[in-house]
Image (spheres, rainbow, N blue to C red):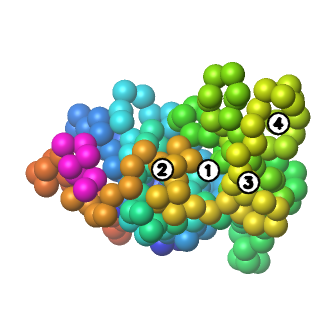
Amino acid sequence: RIEGFIGPLVKEYVIRHVNESREDGANFFIFEINSYGGDGIIGLQLAEAIKDLNDVKTIAYVPEKAISAAAFIALGCDEIIMHPDAQLGDCGAMIEDADGKFQYVPEKTLSIISSSLESLAKANGYPPTLARAMVEKDLVVKEVRDKKTGHVMFLSDAEIAQHDADSLEVRRVIKDKDRFLTVDGTTAVSLDLAKEAVDNLDGLKALYGLENKDIQVVAPNWVDTLIVVLN
């Protein structure tokens, strides 16, 4: 369970418990995420760590919100399951400065984060341009259909310009300028960002054929706090 501020404590406890569980033979992980985010760099590092897990299935379950750095973590998982009204996105990346205050990352850092998030989305089968739209406020994204194949894509104006103008049908604008992409569970499913929308944990368990005995809930404890202090 990933809750509250996304910082060193969350990163340490998730990695530690995943490693311990894998040593015990676990190969299926559900990350219940309910957070407004935190440190964008740490969120991205944790997302990459989850993506790089071998021979395991990873699910992000978002009952209420996965905002900012928390959305990064969700995109690091193989599949995302959300409550219909839950929120995903709004990833104006922020980092903590030397005075302990949070500021939006500079343009150069934002470019690196956007590129990393795009690669993360591609690796896990999410629309990469929509992932970029969560961190790039001025990126315009449109839903387009290939007239020949019928394939639907989500592309920026620059990406559309790379195609033959007559080959694509622009169907609608998904995100305009001056905002970070944020979607609810129902919309996330329609945009291929989420696999399914469920009303509660019972719906999630039914989706994957799980019973209560199959699930062990883990949350941060004093050991995780001690690890952060000692590190």
Q: Identify the residue under disc 4.
A: 160
Residue shown at the point (73%, 57%) measured from the top left: 175
Q: Identify the residue under disc 2.
A: 189
- Residue 54's x, y, as percent? 42, 28
Which is more N-terminal, label 4 or label 3? 4
Q: Is residue 121 above or below residue 167?
A: below
Q: Give the number of the mark in front: 1 or 3.
A: 3
Residue shown at the point (13%, 50%) measured from the top left: 211
Which is more N-terminal, label 4 or label 1? 1
Which is more N-terminal, label 3 or label 1? 1
11 or 78: nearer the eye?
Answer: 78
How far is disc 2 from disc 4 in space, using C-alphas? 23 Å
How far is disc 2 from disc 1 in space, using C-alphas? 22 Å
Residue 23 seen in this snapshot: no
Q: In this view, does 7 lie to the left or right of 185?
A: right
- Residue 76's x, y, as percent? 52, 44
Q: In which quarter of the image is residue 179?
A: bottom right
Q: Identify the residue under disc 3.
A: 173
Residue shown at the point (79%, 26%) measured from the top left: 167
Looking at the rendered structure, the kind of residue marked 2 is: Val
**Residues shaded magenta:** 203-209
- Residue 122's x, y, as percent? 62, 33
67 or 203: nearer the eye?
Answer: 203
How far is disc 2 from disc 3 in space, using C-alphas? 17 Å
Q: Does the magenta stretch include residue 204?
A: yes
Looking at the rendered structure, the kind of residue marked 1 is: Leu
Q: Is residue 109 magenta?
A: no
Residue 94 seen in this snapshot: yes
Q: Identify the residue under disc 1.
A: 44
Look at the numbered disc 4 and give the secondary structure of its residue. Answer: helix
Residue shown at the point (77%, 32%) measured from the top left: 168
- Residue 84's x, y, as percent? 42, 63
